[in-house]
Amino acid sequence: MDAQTLIACWELGRRRHPLDRALLLYAAAEPEADPEALADRTIGERNAALLGLRSALFGDALKSCVDCPECAERLEFELSAGALMAGARDDPPPASHVDVGGRRARLPTTRDLARIVDEPDASSAARKLLGHLLVADASDTRVPADEFANALDTADPRMDFSLALACPACAHRWSASLDVPAFLWQELDVRVRRLLRLRAAW
């Protein structure tokens, strides 16, 4: 993606919902694919493609920061896109299904996430998502949320890159998820705004 393509992508996505931005970036990562079909690919496939695009645009190192939830100390750290993918080499099952509490469910897609964006809280969103994903007995969603999440993570580790963090100030330890599309979009936003400032200076 040259500078003009980056700016065009940014213009298309800057006022869109984050899920739409994720699909816009996914289409840029896989220009030969049908953009409409990308919404029905699994979240793990999408994340893998976006990490590949991110490495091509900005290199392997992902620099980030987060505030400690205990003492608010700012923690800066660096990740490797290659290392993240190396830790999640297992491909999803060929049929993209997983067993959840004795029931068979699909792995979620971006289209599935779009169906739950208006849910008022995480628990109701998880129940509604499970209802969409269950292949049989869709009316029965009495599967514990943690069991559901663990089954999905086991089926495709690329779906949720969980980071183990430790605060150097208070020694608090916690885990956080890397939102791949949001991270990539933030970097693209910074790069494009810099390009636009340079253009204005010319």
Image (spheres, rainbow, N blue to C red):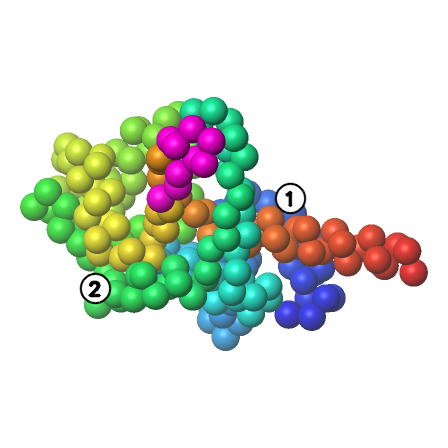
**Secondary structure under the numbered disc 2 in the rendered image:** loop
Q: Which of 165 and 7 is in front in this view?
A: 165
Dot 2 corresponds to which residue?
A: 93
First-in-chain label (2 vs 1)? 1
Pinpoint residue 61: horizontal percent, then vertical percent: 52, 60
Does the magenta run of residues contain 167? yes
Q: Residue 41: tell me if it is visible.
A: no
Question: If the image is split into quadrants, where does the N terminus sit?
Answer: bottom right
**What type is the residue that disc 1 sits on?**
Arg
Disc assigned to residue 15: 1
Q: Residue at x 77, y 58 (%)?
A: 195
Q: Where is residue 36 in the image (x, y as percent from the top left)?
A: 46, 61
Chief SS of the magenta region: loop
Few, some or many C-alpha atoms within 10 Å of disc 1 (few <14, some 14-19, many ≥20)?
Answer: few
Q: Is residue 16 above or below residue 11?
A: above
Q: Is mark 1 on a helix, strand or loop?
A: loop
Residue 164 lies, in percent from the top left, at: 35, 44
* Residue 188: x %, y % from top left: 63, 55
The reply to whether residue 2 is visible in this rendering is yes
Q: What stretch is highlighted in magenta?
A: 164-172
Asked if 154 appears above or below 146 in the picture, the reply is below
Farthest residue in the left direction? 102
Residue at mark 2 to residue at mark 1: CA–CA distance:
35 Å
